[in-house]
Amino acid sequence: MAFADKLSIKAKYPFLPEAKQAFISLGFDLESFRDPSTKPIVDRAISRIVDALLYGENINPNIAAEDDLTELASFPLAIILAAKTGDKYLQRRFALAEASTAYKRLNMEDDPELVLRIAREVFRIDVEYDDSYPPYSYTVGLADYLKSASKFNDPVWKLVNRIVVRGRVYIESRELIRLLRDKIERYILENIEKAEREVGKLPENLEEAVNNIKNKLPERKIEDLTLREGSRPEAWPPCMKSIYSKLTSGESVSHFANFMIAAFLINTGVPTEEIISIYSQRSDFNERIARYQVEHIAGMRGSRTRYITPSCSKIKTNGLCIEDGRLCGNIKNPMTYYKKKIKEIKKIDKDKTQQTGEYSQSSS
């Protein structure tokens, strides 16, 4: 392995259009990777995925292949190998690690024009150079800003804490790069999904590589809430079912969504350990952080205040209400929906028990 600063721009940032064109010009197809001469490329593709599994967003951005060709060609091959594992956690972990690598490398670049070009030309962000309000260096169109920044936890990203002039939001260089990180991650996931649909059977050596990668997957246990005491998922409102589905499939959700599902599950009787296991499906899962946050919401840490489930109005404000509440009726809090459904379910269960008893008596 070598240091990334020795590589060309297109090898360091393989999502760039010129990187894609350079790879195409090499004339590689899947059969090319049977050739022993391409083994360094295959090995680097495997290591990109394995390192992503091990380190996630903490991956070392300086580690790279010895030469441009290996680093450049291993990226699209790694996407194909990740796609062929069929494991959503692995795919998201890989996308997160690659995006984090690009984020760290871009922060080390001396060329501000490179960041601006990537933002404008590659990811179509409405961004302009503007240093009227130091330390800010750029402005982003309000629509683009809100679309991206709403996912971030830090209060500094909230619009009320920003300088906004004529519909444009001032941001620092490092903040623009942070916006790009999510764009890069999404780009990689989209290409993995495309590879899942379009790439056929792999050569034997690549199939073996996929199996070896699968063997390195950590054991992750998804608890089936329907089999445990406490909360009954069939009584959950649609918003909670939606967030739970995203979390258990490994998707990242907003800070508010994480808070609202945790508060809801706690208040419906789900043990904290089980809630933490749900978060373990996220590509950026950190057990120490997740445990602290869940136990804090449960009133086991900090102020010892047990948080209530956010109201429907707050859920709507954060864009997480399903069909504007049409499916829930006139309620003000998800817990109201849950308690009402629980009563209905218990009544149905009771009626079934009575009917079964009456049938048994008549039969005897």
Image (cartoon, rainbow, N blue to C red):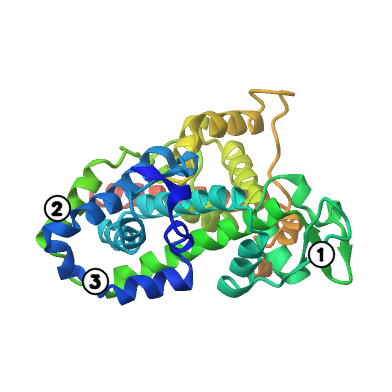
- Whole-Å distance between the Cαs marked 3 and 2? 19 Å
Left or right, 69 with respect to 161, comes to left
Residue 117 place in picture, x, y as percent: 62, 69
Q: Amino acid at mark 3?
A: Phe
Give the quadrant of the N terminus: top left
Circle 3: is it few (<14), some (14-19), or many (20+) Cα within 10 Å?
Answer: few
Left or right, 130 with respect to 182, comes to right
Q: Secondary structure at mark 3?
A: loop
| Residue located 29% across and 58% down the image | 86
| Residue located 66% across and 66% down the image | 116
Closer to the camera in the image, 318 or 77: 77
Left or right, 244 with respect to 114, comes to left
**Reading the chain from its start, which is encountered first: label 1 or label 2?**
1
Q: Nearer the viewer, mark 1 or mark 2?
A: 1
Q: Which mark is residue 28?
A: 3
Q: Can the viewer see residue 210?
A: yes
| Residue located 42% across and 38% down the image | 55
Q: Which residue is mark 2?
A: 208
Q: Secondary structure at mark 1?
A: loop
Q: Identify whether 161 is placed above or below 287.
A: below
Q: Amino acid at mark 1?
A: Asp
Q: Nearer the viewer, mark 3 or mark 2?
A: 3
Q: Can the viewer see residue 350?
A: no
- Whole-Å distance between the Cαs marked 3 and 1? 42 Å
Circle 1: is it few (<14), some (14-19), or many (20+) Cα within 10 Å?
Answer: some
- Whole-Å distance between the Cαs marked 1 and 2? 51 Å
Q: Which mark is residue 10?
A: none
Closer to the camera in the image, 342 or 266: 266
Q: Identify whether 213 is placed above or below 125.
A: above
**Reading the chain from its start, which is encountered first: label 3 or label 1?**
3
